[in-house]
Image (spheres, rainbow, N blue to C red):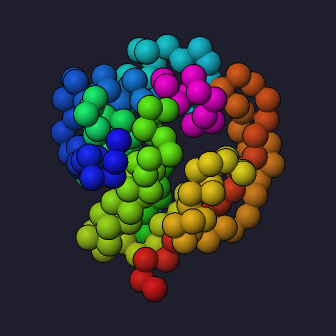
């Protein structure tokens, strides 16, 4: 896959096919060892329920759901959580940047993150925050894209198969 063959879309209203493909991406990531809030074995119904909740939030404007599509369908996703307290109208949280193993190391993650940054700017958000597994490929991607590392928290979560994993917090100032 080339970056040119990748299509980025905002899913304001996810249909059943999109939800099924998002579920496939999530399951693939967790089965591949990604610490993204879910444990193994990840039941398909549990993963689909997660995406239905995300889709409801997107329908109601509380979050923005972006997807990357290749020739086989949805191969990646990222979210912007927009529903924040009244004193934080200038920022958004980035969540669940997931790329299916078939599309990794081909520019999908970077393309999704640039799209998320552009979408945040378009919505008047100029500060983004996210966390990532400490030392992960994703963490290295964020640093390459200019995100600023704030600090690490050890034993923050669990790997999908068990065992503690640390997280690193980052921010990106889009007003600069």
Question: Residue 53 location in percent, x, y?
Answer: 35, 33
Q: Residue furthest front?
A: 2
> What is the count of numbered marks?
0
In-image side of 29 versus 58 (left or right): right
Q: Would residue 89 be visible to someone looking at this image? A: no
Question: Residue 166 location in percent, x, y?
Answer: 75, 46
Residues in magenta, as a range: 27-36
Name above or below for residue 176 compared with residue 107: below
Residue drawn at (77%, 53%) of the image: 153
Q: For this rendering, which residue is in front, 91 or 171? A: 171
Asked where in the image residue 115 lies, by quadrant, the reply is bottom left
Residue drawn at (68%, 68%) of the image: 150
Residue drawn at (38%, 56%) of the image: 111
Q: For this rendering, which residue is in front, 156 or 69? A: 69
In-image side of 18 versus 112 (left or right): left
Query: Magenta stretch: residue 44 in it?
Result: no
Question: Residue 13 location in percent, x, y?
Answer: 18, 39
Q: Quadrant of the N terminus?
A: top left
Asked where in the image residue 20 lies, by quadrant, the reply is top left
Question: Residue 44 location in percent, x, y?
Answer: 43, 15
Q: Would residue 139 be visible to someone looking at this image? A: yes
Residue drawn at (34%, 48%) of the image: 2
Name above or below for residue 23 compared with residue 117: above
Asked where in the image residue 152 lies, by quadrant, the reply is bottom right
Name above or below for residue 101 compared with residue 111: above
Name above or below for residue 175 compared with residue 46: below
């Amino acid at each position: 896959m080339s970056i040119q063959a990748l299509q980025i879309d905002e899913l304001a209203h996810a249909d059943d096919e999109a939800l099924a493909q998002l579920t496939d991406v999530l399951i693939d990531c967790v089965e591949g060892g990604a610490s993204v809030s879910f444990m193994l074995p990840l039941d398909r119904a549990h993963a689909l329920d997660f995406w239905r909740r995300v889709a409801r939030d997107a329908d109601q404007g509380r979050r923005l759901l972006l997807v990357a599509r290749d020739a086989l369908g949805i191969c990646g996703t990222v979210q912007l959580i927009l529903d924040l307290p009244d004193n934080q109208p200038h920022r958004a949280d980035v969540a669940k940047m997931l790329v299916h193993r078939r599309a990794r190391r081909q520019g999908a993650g970077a393309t999704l993150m640039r799209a998320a940054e552009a979408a945040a700017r378009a919505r008047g958000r100029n500060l983004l925050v996210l966390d990532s597994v400490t030392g992960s490929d994703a963490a290295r991607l964020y640093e390459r894209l200019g995100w600023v590392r704030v600090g690490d928290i050890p034993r923050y979560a669990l790997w999908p198969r068990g065992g503690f994993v640390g997280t690193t917090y980052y921010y990106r100032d889009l007003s600069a």
